[in-house]
């Protein structure tokens, strides 16, 4: 094979090589799409306070997940992974969670299944739409939940947007906060002191930002967040005691299934 033939082979291999899409690109487009989807659910007179925090590659990522969302109608924690990635550390986190949810913490399983999600994305075939699987984090490594399909990520965006504009009952919101604090405390070492940013957006496009002192401090009703922001008051309050977790009902209640 002469030099010209070798050059042609290299060019063909370069053209045929699958271009890698990085995890942060998928997350960025998910959040971008979610913004559009939420906007489509708002009327012209609606203000929507929300927490949209990208935690990827921060200390809070190790404790929680890549993305933390909190809207009036839903709290959602999402871990994104690319198919084929090394998952040894993620499997350890998963085993820790499964073990921690046994015994007296079993009551948190229902909250985990509605709040905590795992998204796996495959971009190895450039001739097909983006394929993914979206399952509760507890099912991340279940052999019966490994099938990837086109449209799963889109359905996650649509369902999250629909739930976002509803009203989450106070008990469910408190359970969400308890679960997030529980998740942070089962990791090795002291919990990271991480805050967040509250975004208040209107259907007309106006936006306001306020500081959220503790990223897990989600028990305050969104209408109170909105009132504080609109009054220009300092967004500050004491962190709820973890002792409130003792008030969590021990009996598991039946609820609707959450599927994507």
Image (cartoon, rainbow, N blue to C red):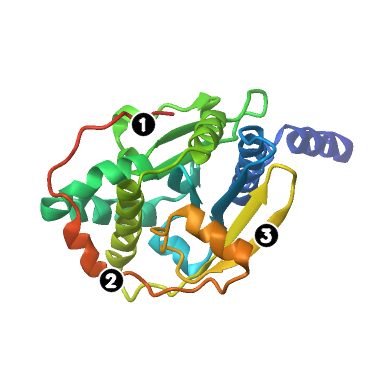
Label 3 Cα crowd, 10 Å radius (few <14 / some 14-19 / many 20+): few
Tag 1's secondary structure?
Answer: loop
Above or below for 204 versus 260: below
Above or below for 13 versus 209: above
User: Which of 34/88 is in front?
Assistant: 34
Q: CA distance from mark 3 to mark 1?
A: 31 Å
Determine which of the numbered discs, if any, sits on residue 258 in the image. Answer: 1
Q: Earlier in the sequence, mark 2 or mark 1?
A: 2
Q: CA distance from mark 2 to mark 1?
A: 29 Å
User: Which of 245/34 is in front?
Assistant: 245
Q: CA distance from mark 2 to mark 3?
A: 29 Å
Query: In the picture, residue 257 is in which quadrant?
Result: top left
Indicate left or right for 3 with 223 as reference: right
Tag 2 residue: 241
Tag 3 residue: 208
Q: Residue at x 21, y 32 (%)?
A: 254
Q: Residue at x 56, y 74 (%)?
A: 234
């Amino acid at each position: 094979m002469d030099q010209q033939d070798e050059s042609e082979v290299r060019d063909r291999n370069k053209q045929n090589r699958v271009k890698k899409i990085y995890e942060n690109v998928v997350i960025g487009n998910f959040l971008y799409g979610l913004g559009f989807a939420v906007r489509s659910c708002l009327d012209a007179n609606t203000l929507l306070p929300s927490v949209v925090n990208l935690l990827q590659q921060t200390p809070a990522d190790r404790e929680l997940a890549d993305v933390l969302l909190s809207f009036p109608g839903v709290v959602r924690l999402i871990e994104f992974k690319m198919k084929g990635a090394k998952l040894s550390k993620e499997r350890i986190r998963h085993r820790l969670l499964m073990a921690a949810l046994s015994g007296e913490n079993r009551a948190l399983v229902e909250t985990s299944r509605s709040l905590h999600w795992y998204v796996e994305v495959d971009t190895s075939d450039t001739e097909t739409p983006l394929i993914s699987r979206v399952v509760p984090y507890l099912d991340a490594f279940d052999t019966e939940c490994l099938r990837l399909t086109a449209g799963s990520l889109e359905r996650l965006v649509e369902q999250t947007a629909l739930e976002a504009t509803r009203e989450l009952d106070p008990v469910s919101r408190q359970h969400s906060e308890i679960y997030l604090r529980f998740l942070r405390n089962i990791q090795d070492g002291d919990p990271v002191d991480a805050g967040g940013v509250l975004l208040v957006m209107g259907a007309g496009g106006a936006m306001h930002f306020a500081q959220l002192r503790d990223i897990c401090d989600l028990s305050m009703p969104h209408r109170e967040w909105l009132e504080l922001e609109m009054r220009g008051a300092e967004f500050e309050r004491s962190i709820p005691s973890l002792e409130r977790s003792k008030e969590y009902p021990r009996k598991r209640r039946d609820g609707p299934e959450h599927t994507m």
